[in-house]
Image (cartoon, rainbow, N blue to C red):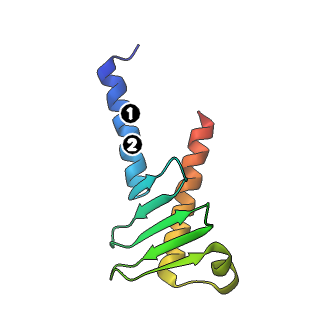
Amino acid sequence: MPSHRENLLLLFYKYCYMYIALVCSEINETSFTSQINFLDHAKIIMCPLMTAVTYIDHDKNFKTYRFQTIQENGCCKGLADNLLYAYEKIKLMLQNSHAR
């Protein structure tokens, strides 16, 4: 049986993996809003309740888009790349949590 210290280390490694996988992520458990920071200092804040995403680019310009608007009209390459990355990492995290 693992010791308390080993359990803490496993928990720490799990969260380090999640941090590295999403670069830096924060999920609000009340509204399920998630914020993901990227290495180029861009940031996306996704809100399922508003069905919208706010994109803050590396120059600190920000704009909020409804997902429907992105679906109909597209978006800039930076936002598209970051949304794709976030989608892939969140999908992987969900698959891993269901496998346990």
Vertical comparison of 84 with 71: above or below: above
Question: Mark 2 packing: few (<14 Cα in 10 Å), some, or many (20+)?
Answer: few
The answer to which image quadrant residue 59 occupies is bottom left
Q: Is residue 6 above or below residue 23?
A: above
Task: Say what amino acid the circle numbered 2 marks.
Answer: Tyr
Extreme residue in the top direction: 1
| Furthest residue in direction left, as rendered | 5
Does residue 41 lie above or below 19 as drawn?
below
Residue at x-position 59% and y-position 54%: 91
Q: Are marks 1 and 2 in contact (CB under 8 Å)?
A: yes
As drawn, is 72 to the left or to the right of 22?
A: right
Label 2: which secondary element? helix
The residue tagged 1 is 11
Q: Position of residue 27 (x, y in %)?
A: 47, 52
Please state which of residues 6 and 47 is positioned toward the viewer in this rendering: 47
Residue that label 2 marks: 15
Q: Amino acid at mark 1?
A: Leu
Q: Could you tell me which residue is drawn at 63 percent across and 67 percent down?
A: 51
Where the C terminus falls, by quadrant? top right
3D distance between C-alphas at marks 1 and 2: 6 Å
Judge by depth and name the residue closer to the eye, 34 or 3.
34
Instruction: Label 1, secondary structure: give it.
Output: helix
Residue 64 placement (x, y as % from top left): 52, 77
The N terminus lies in quadrant? top left
